[in-house]
Amino acid sequence: MRIGELEQKSGASRHTLRYYESVGLLSVQRHSNNYREYSPRSLSDLTFIQQAQGMGFSLSEIREILQAQRDQQLDCAQGALLVGRKLLEVEAKIASLKQMKRFLRSEKKRLEDSAAEQALNAARQS
């Protein structure tokens, strides 16, 4: 399929498709007229790319997974390592977000208390 058809079926822009091609995420054949020809697998690869990005995988991680799939070298142990690394990243983000949440709650309470005290002082001066 040509780029316009893949664009229509996937919802990804031509710019995105060309970028994914340039970084090795999508493979494409070029004809003598320089038209791109995408295989039916390109659509499933693109769906995987979009889903993996939505789950927080980087493009380099996605490229690593896709390359291993294409080379039929992705085994369970390798998959477990990839998932384990991503799990550690997610757990670190969760810890960081929890810390931020505690800080924001504390700061909100401090500011509310300060505002209430200022309002009380203003009322006393009136």
Image: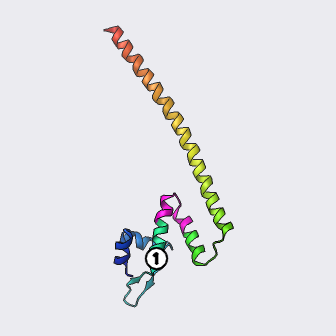
Q: How many marks?
A: 1
Q: Dominant secondary structure of the magenta stretch?
A: helix
Residue 115 point in image, percent of width and height: 40, 21
Residue on which the image places disc 1? 42
Q: Residue 114 or 38: which is nearer the viewer?
A: 38
Please give left or right for residue 12 compared with residue 57 in the image: left
Please report the residue visible at 66 percent of the width from the left and 68 percent of the height from the top: 76
Q: Is residue 57 located in the magenta-colored stretch of the structure?
A: yes
Residue furthest toward the bottom? 32
Residue 7 x %, y %: 36, 73
Looking at the rendered image, the quarter that the C terminus falls into is top left
Q: Residue furthest right?
A: 77
When the figure is inspected, residue 6 is found, relative to residue 77, above or below; the finding is below
The residue lying at 49 percent from left, 32 percent from top is 105
Quarter of the picture holding the N terminus = bottom left
Front-most of 36 and 70?
70
The residue that appears at 51% across and 63% down in the rendered structure is 52
Q: Amino acid at mark 1?
A: Ser
Label 1: how many Cα within 10 Å (few below 14, some 14–19, many 20+)? some
Q: Which of these two is toward me, 74 or 63?
A: 74
- x and y percentages locating residue 3 in the rendered image: 37, 78
91 in magenta: no
**Helix, strand or loop status at disc 1:** helix
Q: Position of residue 108 (x, y in %)?
A: 45, 29
* Magenta residues, start to end: 50-62
